[in-house]
Image: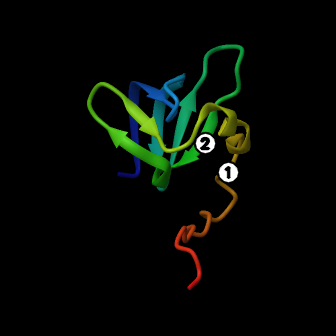
Amino acid sequence: MEYADFKIPVYTADGERIGFLAHVDGPFMRISRGWLRRSVWIPTEYVATATARAVTVAFESDQLPRFRDVRHLSPPEPVDDRKAA
C-alpha cells in the first residue's frame, strides 16, 4: 500500500495511546499526535498488531522520541536475542 488515510488509534506495547494513524507511505506510517504535538514516522515493521479498530506498536512509550523523523534512516537491523553458544 503506497498511500492511504486512516483515523485509527495507535497504542504502545505498554498501553499508552500515542496518536492516530494518519497515513501509510511505503514502509512508514505517520502517527498524528494532535495540533500541538509533532507527528512521528514509524517503520511499519514495528507494528505488533493491527485491527480495524487499533494498531499496537512493538515498543513502549518511553521509546517514542527516537521516531521523530526516521524516514531518512534505513530500517534497523534485526536483533538476535539468542545467546552465543
Which residue type carries mark 2?
Trp
In this rendered view, identify the residue nearer to me: 5 or 48. Answer: 48
Query: Residue at the spot x=64%, y=30% of the render?
Result: 39
Circle 2 crowding by C-alpha within 10 Å: few under 14, some 14–19, many from 20: many
* The C terminus lies in quadrant: bottom right
Residue 46 x/y as whole percent: 49, 50
Query: Residue at the spot x=54%, y=37% of the render?
Result: 30
Residue at label 1? 70
Q: Coloured how?
A: rainbow
Residue 49 x/y as whole percent: 35, 41
Residue at label 2? 41
Taking 45 as reference, is 76 above or below it? below
Residue farthest to the left, as pictured: 52
Q: Earlier in the sequence, mark 1 or mark 2?
A: 2
Marks 1/2: CA–CA distance:
6 Å
Tag 1 near tag 2, CB within 8 Å: yes
Query: Residue at the spot x=70%, y=27% of the render?
Result: 38
Taking 5 as reference, is 41 above or below it? below
